[in-house]
Amino acid sequence: MRTQTTKIALIGAAALVLMAAPAAFGHAAPTITHPEVNASVNWNAPKQVIVGFGASGAFGQAANLESFPAPTRTKLLNLLFSTKSGIGLTVVRSLVNDGNGSEGNGLTIEPSPGTWDWSILPDAQIWLMRQAAKYGVKTFMATPWSPPAWMKANDSLAGGSGNTLNYLLPKYYHAYAVYLANYVNGYWTHFHIRITDISVQNEPDQNQTYASAIWTPEQFNTFIKDDLGPVFAAKGVKAKVIMPEQSFWGEQYALPTLNDPAAAKYVSIVAAHGYGGTIAPLTVAESKGKQVWETEYSTFTTEDPSITNGIAVAQTINQYLTVADVSVWNYWWLVNGQTNDNEGLINLLGESSYIANKRLFTMGNFSRFIRPGDYRIGSSVNPAPGISMSAYRNRKTGQFAVVVINANAARESYALAGLPLSVGSTTPYVTSASQNLAQEAKVSVTAGRFVTTLAPMSVTTFVGG
């Protein structure tokens, strides 16, 4: 996350929009006259396992959602988590110790050494996790934006430009490991919520005026090897350790830990954010058998609910899946009730209305149909200009999903080969300027191949099995 902002009012007739549905094309777009796009899948070439897709309710966004009137709130939860009327998210990322809304308010479950105060919780994030669990969500990851202030050299959650003391004091490494262990175990004891994955630090390369802390790669290695790993083992913490969650894509901050077997054994997931860097494989992490997660992405330009933004987000997801081999892809906020930009999948307006952005639905072309435990399989990736795709299957059930992005302004003839001979048809679900995960008529499959037409500026998921 780049910035923390205060809630602003978005009032006016133009803002009272419940569903973002840009106007459909005035007439049918022509089919491009060049030969059909020929693509294929390799059914027996499994790649990475998929854990899921998600977003966060941090910095008060869970509270913004919870405060909506019950009928509308239910619609929003359905949009986010239902596999029937929504996008079926399967990961919720929370902010560690988000005392009643924002880490910046200074509340902590350990306000002084050895003193524990769970009375600041439960908060709206706990409400959100409980709601998500009702839809079957099982992956709950938690990220600290800062250690408690008393553990840091500057005695503050926040840092800022030129604040060279915005770091965890080495003498408190063990105390911080205990803090994280007790946080995970306490969520189960007090709230019966299982934190499945726990990060060490959000964006350790960012010295921000809001809650933050700077870590060097070498400090991560020392802390994980000497304190976090042994403390988690001693306290029976089952949550998988995530690191380093740097702000840009890469594994630089993880390398000393990964290359030290005594530290690497405690780390299960190497994660980074998508605010810069080149989307590429994290080769060292993969060579060490670690899952790779993308845990935060958004843009901060003026809110764009259109299919143009939806296509851009879909292309980004597809790149992370096919190039960087990620098992989790997270957007930043589930909902945005504070800023008029693209930080949320859904933008909340006033007290009861909202915009369901096209990026919500194009993300849903992945998250609704690619389920935890599925594998990405080999496929064409960019079979023609403006066309990108990826394919997935469940090796137990035989269910498959092929996601195809048409970023062109015209219809495209599309042919896919390589499906099992037993498949007789596939069902397309389309998000376009005028459709939101719309189920269309089945397409016949003959000898493992089908031919169809892709709508202009659209994302289509073909499912079957």
Image: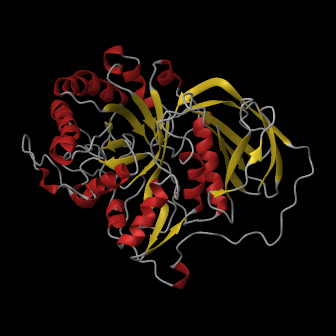
Q: Which residue is drawn at 60% across and 50% down?
A: 365
Q: In which quarter of the image is the C terminus?
A: top right
Query: How is the model colour-coded?
Result: secondary structure
Left or right of residue 465: residue 63: left
202 or 150: nearer the viewer: 202
The answer to whether residue 447 is above or below residue 450 is: above
**Is residue 153 in view?**
no
x, y (%) of residue 179? 18, 38
User: In screen coordinates, is 48 left or right of 378?
Assistant: left
Location of residue 411 in the rendering, given as x and y in whole percent from the top left corner: 82, 55
Residue situated furthest top in the rendering: 261
Q: Residue at x 80, y 36 (%)?
A: 449
Compare residues 329 and 137 and report the one nearer the observer: 137
Q: Is residue 374 above or below residue 95?
A: above
Q: Nearer the viewer, residue 411 or 4?
A: 411
* x then y, percent, for residue 306: 63, 64
Compared to residue 64, the image places residue 296 above or below, namely: above
